[in-house]
Amino acid sequence: MPAMPRRRVLRRAGAAALGFLGPWSTHHAWAQAKRRKPLLIGLTTDDSGQYAASGQDEQRGIRMAIAEFNERGGVLGRPIETVQADTGGDPVKAAGVAQRMVDQEVNFLIGAVHSGAANAISKIAQAHGVVYLNSNSSSPTEAGKDCHRTKFVWDGNGTNFSTSIVRGAMTGFGRDWALITSDYTWGHNTAKGIRGIVEGNGGKIVEELVVPQNARDFGAQLKRIQQIKPGVIATAVGGEDVKVLRDQVRRAGMDRGFAWINNQQDWPDVYSAGPEQLFGIFGTTWYWGLSLAGVNEFNARYQKANPGYRIKKPGNVFYNGYMATRELLRAIERVGSTNNLKLIRELEGLRISALDRMQHHAAFMNPATHQLQQTIYMAAYNTRPKEPDDMFRILGQQRPEEVEDRDSVKACKLETYAATPSYEL
C-alpha cells in the first residue's frame, strides 16, 4: 500500500489540545537543516486556449516576483521553487492540474485567467487547505458564490469595472443599452452586473446577444445592433474572441457610430492594436504610463527580466500576477511561517499603500470575500501617444469604495477556519 501523502494527514481544530502535533513535526526538521527545504509554488496558468496571451503574461509576473525574493535569499531562508502546468483555460483540465500539484505537496497555488478554470482549481485547493491566489480571473462569482476560505482574488471583477464606467456612459450616450455576452461564467456574470447597474440608474437593456466561446463570426449580432440602434453597446467578451469582435466591428464601420463599453481590456489582448481596433471606453487596474512613484523603476525591472519578449511594457495581467505573488511572500515573512491558517488570517487583514501598489489609492483585502479592493481606471485609446506602446489614455480613476461589488459580499459564504484543513510544509 503506498504511503499516504503528508498533506492528507490533516490537522483539525482541537487536535493540538489532544496532543497531536500534526504533519509539520516532520517538515519542521527542515528548519534546523543546513539546507532549508525549498518553498514549492504551483503555477496553474492558462498558457493555451482562449486566454493564452494573458496566461503566459501573468506567469512572467509571478516568476519575476519569485526571482526578486530568491535574489534576496528566498523566504525564511528557504529558496522558492516552482512547478508549472498549462490549464488550457479548461475547468476539467485545471482541476486535474491542481490535484496533481497538491499531490506533489506544493505549498501554494497561483494563477488562472479563465474563471471556470479558477473555480475548479479553488475547489481542489479548499478541499486540501491549500492557499490559492486567483491572480487574474474577473468573474464576480469568484469572490461571490464561488468564494472559498483558501482563495484570494487579486483582479478587479466585472462589477467593479462596470460600476466605474456605466454611469458616465449613461450620461454621455443614452439610456438604451444592448449587451453582447460570451456564453460562460465570466461573460454571464459580468453582463448581469452591467444590467443591474444600468437598470439601477434608470436605463434599459433593450436586448442581450449571447455568443458562444471561441466565436469567429459576429455578423448576426452586429446586424441586430444596426437594427435596434441602442445608445450604448456593452461587451462581456474576452481573450481571442474580443480581438475578432473588434476587427469585425471596424470592418462593418460600427466603431465610431455607436458608443462601445468594453468592460475590461487586458494588455496582452490589445497589445499593438491600433486605433481601428481599440475603440470605446474600458477599464483596467493598472497602466505602465501612470505618472506615479515607482512605475518607471517597475518598468525597468520588467524589461531587464524579459529581454526579447514581444510585449515591451508591463500591463495589468503581468502586474496582477506579480503583486499577488509578492504579497503572499511578504505575508509569509511577516508571519514567520507557512502555516496556511495563519497566512489566511494575515492576508484577510492586508492593506497596501497607494505608493506600494503604484496606484492612486490604497488597496485592501475584503475579509468577507477575499477580493482585493483597489483603484479602478477608466481608459480609452490614446490618440496622442508619447511612444508606440503608449496606447491607453487614462480618463479617470475611482476609489475602491466607489466600485465595491456589494452583491459578492451578500453571495459569499466562506468556509469556517475549523472546516478548513490546516497544514505547514
Image (cartoon, grey):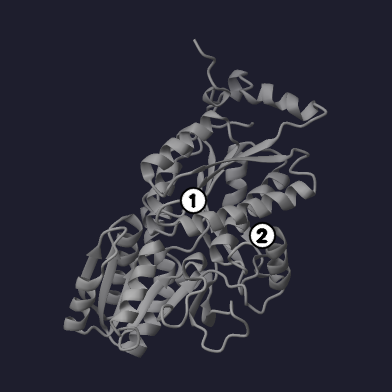
Q: Residue 417's x, y, as percent?
A: 51, 38
Q: Residue 202's x, y, as percent?
A: 27, 81
Crowding at dot 1, Cα within 10 Å, few <14 / some 14-19 / many 20+, comes out as many
Furthest residue to the front? 308
Q: Residue at x 27, y 72 (%)?
A: 179
Q: Is residue 14 above or below residue 309?
A: above
Which of these two is toward me, 305 or 419? 305
Q: Residue 226's x, y, as percent?
A: 20, 82
Which of these two is toward me, 35 or 32? 35
Q: Which residue is mark 2?
A: 306
Q: Secondary structure at mark 1?
A: loop
- Looking at numbered disc 1 in the image, what kind of residue is underneath it? Asp
Q: Secondary structure at mark 2?
A: loop
**Does residue 177 appear anywhere in the picture?**
yes
Q: Residue at x 48, y 82 (%)?
A: 381
Q: Quadrant of the C terminus?
A: top right
- Left/right of residue 243 with respect to residue 381 in the rendered view: left
Q: Which residue is mark 1?
A: 47
Q: Earlier in the sequence, mark 2 or mark 1?
A: 1
- Looking at numbered disc 2 in the image, what kind of residue is underneath it? Asn
Q: Is residue 380 above or below residue 147?
A: below
